[in-house]
Protein backbone atom coordinates (compact mmCIF):
# COMPACT_ATOMS: atom_id res chain seq x y z
CA UNK A 1 0.00 0.00 0.00
CA UNK A 2 1.15 3.56 -0.70
CA UNK A 3 -0.07 7.14 -1.24
CA UNK A 4 -0.52 8.54 -4.76
CA UNK A 5 -1.96 11.82 -6.07
CA UNK A 6 -5.46 11.53 -7.56
CA UNK A 7 -6.55 13.80 -10.50
CA UNK A 8 -8.32 16.16 -8.03
CA UNK A 9 -5.13 16.59 -6.00
CA UNK A 10 -6.19 14.43 -3.06
CA UNK A 11 -3.88 11.73 -1.77
CA UNK A 12 -5.43 8.29 -1.92
CA UNK A 13 -4.18 4.87 -0.93
CA UNK A 14 -2.97 2.73 -3.78
CA UNK A 15 -2.26 -1.01 -3.75
CA UNK A 16 0.80 -1.94 -5.81
CA UNK A 17 0.19 -4.90 -8.09
CA UNK A 18 2.87 -7.59 -8.10
CA UNK A 19 5.06 -7.70 -11.19
CA UNK A 20 4.17 -10.61 -13.45
CA UNK A 21 6.93 -13.10 -14.18
CA UNK A 22 7.57 -14.00 -17.82
CA UNK A 23 6.50 -17.45 -18.93
CA UNK A 24 9.62 -19.65 -19.39
CA UNK A 25 8.09 -21.02 -22.59
CA UNK A 26 7.85 -17.48 -23.99
CA UNK A 27 11.51 -16.82 -23.11
CA UNK A 28 12.61 -20.06 -24.78
CA UNK A 29 10.62 -19.23 -27.91
CA UNK A 30 12.20 -15.76 -28.05
CA UNK A 31 15.69 -17.24 -27.68
CA UNK A 32 15.00 -19.67 -30.51
CA UNK A 33 13.85 -16.80 -32.75
CA UNK A 34 17.09 -14.91 -32.04
CA UNK A 35 19.23 -17.98 -32.74
CA UNK A 36 17.29 -18.71 -35.93
CA UNK A 37 17.85 -15.13 -37.10
CA UNK A 38 21.58 -15.48 -36.39
CA UNK A 39 21.77 -18.71 -38.38
CA UNK A 40 19.91 -17.21 -41.34
CA UNK A 41 22.03 -14.07 -41.72
CA UNK A 42 22.89 -13.02 -45.30
CA UNK A 43 25.64 -15.04 -46.95
CA UNK A 44 27.81 -11.99 -47.48
CA UNK A 45 27.83 -11.31 -43.72
CA UNK A 46 28.65 -14.92 -42.92
CA UNK A 47 31.46 -14.99 -45.48
CA UNK A 48 32.91 -11.74 -44.13
CA UNK A 49 32.94 -13.14 -40.59
CA UNK A 50 34.54 -16.33 -41.86
CA UNK A 51 37.33 -14.29 -43.47
CA UNK A 52 37.91 -12.32 -40.28
CA UNK A 53 38.02 -15.36 -37.99
CA UNK A 54 39.53 -18.01 -40.23
CA UNK A 55 41.52 -16.88 -43.25
CA UNK A 56 42.93 -13.74 -41.62
CA UNK A 57 44.19 -15.75 -38.61
CA UNK A 58 45.63 -18.66 -40.57
CA UNK A 59 47.48 -16.39 -43.00
CA UNK A 60 46.30 -18.00 -46.26
CA UNK A 61 43.14 -19.12 -48.00
CA UNK A 62 42.98 -22.85 -48.86
CA UNK A 63 42.90 -23.70 -52.59
CA UNK A 64 39.39 -23.75 -54.05
CA UNK A 65 37.94 -21.31 -51.52
CA UNK A 66 35.97 -18.32 -52.73
CA UNK A 67 34.89 -15.36 -50.63
CA UNK A 68 31.35 -16.76 -50.63
CA UNK A 69 32.42 -20.19 -49.39
CA UNK A 70 32.66 -22.68 -52.28
CA UNK A 71 33.93 -22.43 -55.84
CA UNK A 72 31.96 -22.55 -59.09
CA UNK A 73 33.73 -25.82 -59.93
CA UNK A 74 32.46 -27.41 -56.71
CA UNK A 75 28.96 -26.12 -57.37
CA UNK A 76 28.94 -27.84 -60.77
CA UNK A 77 30.23 -31.10 -59.27
CA UNK A 78 27.56 -31.04 -56.57
CA UNK A 79 24.84 -30.27 -59.12
CA UNK A 80 25.97 -33.23 -61.27
CA UNK A 81 25.94 -35.47 -58.19
CA UNK A 82 22.47 -34.33 -57.15
CA UNK A 83 21.04 -34.98 -60.63
CA UNK A 84 21.63 -38.72 -60.10
CA UNK A 85 20.01 -38.91 -56.64
CA UNK A 86 16.37 -39.79 -55.95
CA UNK A 87 16.18 -37.35 -53.01
CA UNK A 88 17.92 -33.98 -52.94
CA UNK A 89 18.99 -34.02 -49.28
CA UNK A 90 20.62 -37.43 -49.57
CA UNK A 91 23.45 -35.66 -51.38
CA UNK A 92 24.32 -33.35 -48.49
CA UNK A 93 26.94 -35.55 -46.80
CA UNK A 94 28.86 -36.33 -50.03
CA UNK A 95 28.75 -32.61 -50.85
CA UNK A 96 30.11 -31.72 -47.41
CA UNK A 97 33.03 -34.11 -47.95
CA UNK A 98 33.75 -32.53 -51.34
CA UNK A 99 33.83 -29.04 -49.84
CA UNK A 100 35.91 -30.17 -46.87
CA UNK A 101 38.48 -31.84 -49.12
CA UNK A 102 38.77 -28.77 -51.34
CA UNK A 103 38.70 -26.06 -48.66
CA UNK A 104 40.03 -27.76 -45.54
CA UNK A 105 36.91 -26.94 -43.50
CA UNK A 106 33.20 -26.17 -43.68
CA UNK A 107 32.96 -22.43 -43.11
CA UNK A 108 29.75 -20.59 -42.26
CA UNK A 109 29.76 -19.16 -45.77
CA UNK A 110 30.03 -22.63 -47.31
CA UNK A 111 27.29 -23.93 -45.01
CA UNK A 112 25.04 -21.07 -46.10
CA UNK A 113 25.58 -21.87 -49.79
CA UNK A 114 25.02 -25.60 -49.27
CA UNK A 115 21.83 -24.77 -47.38
CA UNK A 116 20.54 -22.96 -50.47
CA UNK A 117 21.48 -25.86 -52.75
CA UNK A 118 19.81 -28.48 -50.54
CA UNK A 119 16.85 -26.30 -49.48
CA UNK A 120 17.79 -26.34 -45.82
CA UNK A 121 18.70 -23.85 -43.11
CA UNK A 122 22.43 -23.14 -42.48
CA UNK A 123 21.97 -24.35 -38.90
CA UNK A 124 20.83 -27.75 -40.19
CA UNK A 125 23.91 -28.08 -42.40
CA UNK A 126 26.22 -27.13 -39.53
CA UNK A 127 24.44 -29.64 -37.26
CA UNK A 128 25.46 -32.41 -39.68
CA UNK A 129 29.06 -31.15 -39.55
CA UNK A 130 29.06 -31.08 -35.74
CA UNK A 131 28.11 -34.76 -35.39
CA UNK A 132 30.72 -35.89 -37.92
CA UNK A 133 34.09 -37.24 -36.80
CA UNK A 134 35.92 -36.15 -39.96
CA UNK A 135 34.40 -32.75 -40.82
CA UNK A 136 35.56 -29.51 -39.19
CA UNK A 137 34.02 -26.05 -39.15
CA UNK A 138 37.47 -24.54 -39.41
CA UNK A 139 40.67 -25.49 -41.18
CA UNK A 140 43.07 -27.62 -39.09
CA UNK A 141 46.80 -28.16 -39.35
CA UNK A 142 48.33 -31.62 -39.72
CA UNK A 143 50.15 -31.24 -36.38
CA UNK A 144 48.43 -29.66 -33.38
CA UNK A 145 51.15 -27.83 -31.43
CA UNK A 146 50.12 -26.56 -27.98
CA UNK A 147 52.11 -24.50 -25.49
CA UNK A 148 51.03 -24.80 -21.85
CA UNK A 149 49.84 -21.50 -20.37
CA UNK A 150 48.66 -22.77 -16.99
CA UNK A 151 49.31 -20.69 -13.88
CA UNK A 152 52.73 -22.11 -13.01
CA UNK A 153 53.91 -22.01 -16.63
CA UNK A 154 52.73 -18.43 -17.03
CA UNK A 155 54.87 -17.42 -14.06
CA UNK A 156 57.84 -19.06 -15.80
CA UNK A 157 57.33 -17.07 -19.00
CA UNK A 158 55.11 -19.40 -21.05
CA UNK A 159 53.24 -16.52 -22.70
CA UNK A 160 56.47 -14.82 -23.77
CA UNK A 161 57.77 -18.19 -25.04
CA UNK A 162 54.59 -18.79 -27.07
CA UNK A 163 54.70 -15.33 -28.64
CA UNK A 164 58.40 -15.64 -29.43
CA UNK A 165 57.89 -19.09 -30.98
CA UNK A 166 54.99 -17.74 -33.04
CA UNK A 167 57.24 -15.01 -34.42
CA UNK A 168 60.16 -17.38 -34.96
CA UNK A 169 58.21 -19.91 -37.06
CA UNK A 170 55.88 -17.36 -38.70
CA UNK A 171 52.59 -18.85 -37.47
CA UNK A 172 50.01 -16.83 -35.55
CA UNK A 173 48.72 -18.15 -32.24
CA UNK A 174 45.51 -20.06 -33.07
CA UNK A 175 46.69 -19.96 -36.69
CA UNK A 176 48.05 -22.43 -39.24
CA UNK A 177 51.26 -22.39 -41.25
CA UNK A 178 50.92 -21.67 -44.96
CA UNK A 179 51.88 -25.25 -45.85
CA UNK A 180 49.23 -26.59 -43.46
CA UNK A 181 51.77 -28.53 -41.36
CA UNK A 182 51.53 -26.73 -38.03
CA UNK A 183 48.61 -25.35 -36.05
CA UNK A 184 49.91 -23.35 -33.10
CA UNK A 185 47.80 -22.86 -29.99
CA UNK A 186 47.78 -22.97 -26.22
CA UNK A 187 46.68 -25.43 -23.53
CA UNK A 188 45.67 -24.67 -19.96
CA UNK A 189 47.68 -27.37 -18.16
CA UNK A 190 49.75 -30.37 -19.28
CA UNK A 191 50.49 -31.63 -15.77
CA UNK A 192 54.24 -30.98 -15.60
CA UNK A 193 54.35 -27.59 -13.94
CA UNK A 194 57.99 -27.82 -12.84
CA UNK A 195 59.33 -28.25 -16.39
CA UNK A 196 58.07 -25.15 -18.20
CA UNK A 197 57.94 -24.23 -20.97
CA UNK A 198 56.01 -27.27 -22.23
CA UNK A 199 55.13 -28.05 -25.84
CA UNK A 200 52.54 -30.69 -26.69
CA UNK A 201 52.50 -32.27 -30.18
CA UNK A 202 49.94 -35.03 -30.62
CA UNK A 203 50.62 -37.51 -27.80
CA UNK A 204 54.12 -36.21 -27.01
CA UNK A 205 55.01 -33.59 -24.40
CA UNK A 206 58.39 -31.83 -24.68
CA UNK A 207 59.64 -30.27 -21.43
CA UNK A 208 62.00 -27.47 -20.52
CA UNK A 209 62.48 -26.22 -24.07
CA UNK A 210 64.21 -23.15 -25.38
CA UNK A 211 63.30 -21.55 -28.72
CA UNK A 212 66.07 -23.27 -30.68
CA UNK A 213 65.03 -26.71 -29.42
CA UNK A 214 61.36 -26.05 -30.13
CA UNK A 215 62.14 -24.88 -33.65
CA UNK A 216 64.26 -27.97 -34.37
CA UNK A 217 61.42 -30.23 -33.24
CA UNK A 218 58.91 -28.43 -35.41
CA UNK A 219 61.23 -28.42 -38.43
CA UNK A 220 61.46 -32.21 -38.19
CA UNK A 221 57.69 -32.70 -38.51
CA UNK A 222 56.54 -34.04 -41.88
Image (tube, rainbow, N blue to C red):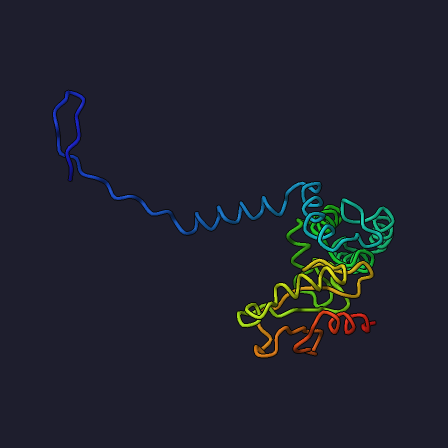
Outermost residue on the top side: it is: 8
Q: Is residue 131 left or right of residue 71?
A: left
Q: Position of residue 131 (x, y in %)?
A: 66, 64
**Picture quarter with the C terminus:** bottom right
Q: Residue at x 71, y 45 (%)?
A: 47
Q: Nearer the viewer, residue 154 or 89?
A: 154
Q: Residue at x 60, y 75 (%)?
A: 190
Q: Residue at x 77, y 45 (%)?
A: 67
Q: Is residue 82 left or right of residue 51?
A: right
Q: Position of residue 26 (x, y in %)?
A: 43, 47
Q: Nearer the viewer, residue 54 or 165?
A: 165
The answer to whether 157 is drawn above or below residue 112 in the figure is: below
Task: Answer with the quarter of the image where residue 172 lies.
Answer: bottom right
Task: Answer with the quarter of the image where residue 214 lies.
Answer: bottom right
**Picture quarter with the N terminus:** top left
Q: Position of residue 144 (x, y in %)?
A: 71, 68
Q: Position of residue 43 (x, y in %)?
A: 70, 42
Q: How many marks?
A: 0
Amino acid sequence: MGLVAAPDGLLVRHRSLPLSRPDPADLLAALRRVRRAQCDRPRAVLALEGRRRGVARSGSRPPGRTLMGISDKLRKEIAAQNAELPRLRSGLLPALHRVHQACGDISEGAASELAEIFEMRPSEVLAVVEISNVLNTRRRGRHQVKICVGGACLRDGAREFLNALSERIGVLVDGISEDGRIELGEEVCLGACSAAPLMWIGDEVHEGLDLDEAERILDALD
